[in-house]
Image: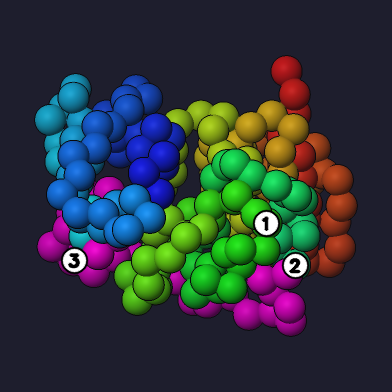
């Protein structure tokens, strides 16, 4: 994981937004975190970083949640284009169904670090532009208003609200396979729909 991601992560166990503190045990030559601990100063929970993956689950005895991989033509390019970022720095979130694509999305927008979640990321290598996390949700383990974009697949209304909470005002949330999500679900999440085709929605977080 990128060391700067620490500033945007929250303790999943604390109800209030509580930042985590990183103890580094091993880094790559580029300074990426391979091994260490994320600790919560409030509830004293510790979350390991192993093989570059930040494991924010409360129950680490079972396998991380799996997601069916979302397939689509030119998906890495479409993800980068629809999120609409042209340069970094910043972090953008990819939901678990998109995580297998993350190494091909990385590098398409200079300076953007893609945060990918779910069981599939454990198999990905540590590489620049890709920060890997696992968590057991439904809350996203990010502080509010920190990410520069989020990409979801088949989101429920609660997923839209939660992802909208984590992105900057004016930044985009992209939802694939969103035919089941009515316009109201986006509006209620504080988003304005910028484009919608049958199954893909691009929405912008309202400013103010
Ligand atoms: Zn905590």
Q: Decide if residue 187 is in sight here.
A: no
In the image, which residues are magenta?
51-77
Residue 135 lies in the magenta-colored region: no
SS of the residue at dot 1?
Answer: loop
Task: Kindly tell me whether mark 3's CB lies below 8 Å from ligand 1.
Answer: no
Q: Is residue 186 left or right of residue 5?
A: right
Viewer-proximal residue, 68 or 108? 108
Residue 40 seen in render: yes
Q: CA distance from mark 3 to mark 2?
A: 33 Å
Disc 2 packing (10 Å; few <14; some 14–19; many ≥20): few
> In the depicted view, which residue is nearer to us: 85 or 202?
85
Of tags 1 and 3, which is closer to the observer? 1
Q: Residue at x 34, y 50 (%)?
A: 31
Disc with the residue nearer the chain's start (3 vs 2): 3
Give how far across and how far down residue 102 sits, in percent. Answer: 53, 68
Relative to residue 85, is residue 207 depicted above or below? Answer: above
**Callout in the foreground (3, 2):** 2
Q: How far across and down, in percent of the image, does residue 8 sit?
A: 43, 35
Asked if disc 2 is less than 8 Å from ligand 1, the answer is no
Q: Position of residue 70 (x, y in %)?
A: 59, 75
What colouring does the structure picture have?
rainbow
Q: Which residue is mark 2?
A: 78
Q: Are marks 1 and 3 in contact (CB under 8 Å)?
A: no
Q: Nearer the viewer, residue 183 or 20?
A: 20
Few, some or many residues within 10 Å of mark 3 (<14, 14–19, 20+): few
Q: Secondary structure at mark 3?
A: loop
- Mark-to-mark CA distance, 2 and 1: 12 Å
Q: Which residue is mark 1?
A: 109
Residue 76 vs residue 182: left or right? left
């Amino acid at each position: 994981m990128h060391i700067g991601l620490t500033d945007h992560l929250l303790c999943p166990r604390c109800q209030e937004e509580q930042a985590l503190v990183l103890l580094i045990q091993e880094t790559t030559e580029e300074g990426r975190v391979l091994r260490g601990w994320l600790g919560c100063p409030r509830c004293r929970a510790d979350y390991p970083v192993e093989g570059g993956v930040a494991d924010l689950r409360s129950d680490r005895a079972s396998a991380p949640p799996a997601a069916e991989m979302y397939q689509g033509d030119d998906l890495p390019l479409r993800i980068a284009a629809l999120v609409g970022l042209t340069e970094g720095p910043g972090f953008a979130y990819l939901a678990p169904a998109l995580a297998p694509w993350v190494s091909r999305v990385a590098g398409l927008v200079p300076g953007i670090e893609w945060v990918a979640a779910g069981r599939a990321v454990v198999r990905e290598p540590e590489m620049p532009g890709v920060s890997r996390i696992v968590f057991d949700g439904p809350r996203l383990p990010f502080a509010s208003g920190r990410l520069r974009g989020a990409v979801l697949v088949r989101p429920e209304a609660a997923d839209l609200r939660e992802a909208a909470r984590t992105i900057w005002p004016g930044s985009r949330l992209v939802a694939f396979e969103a035919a089941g999500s009515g316009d109201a679900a986006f509006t209620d999440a504080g988003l304005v729909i910028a484009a919608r085709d049958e199954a893909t929605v691009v929405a912008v977080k309202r400013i103010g």
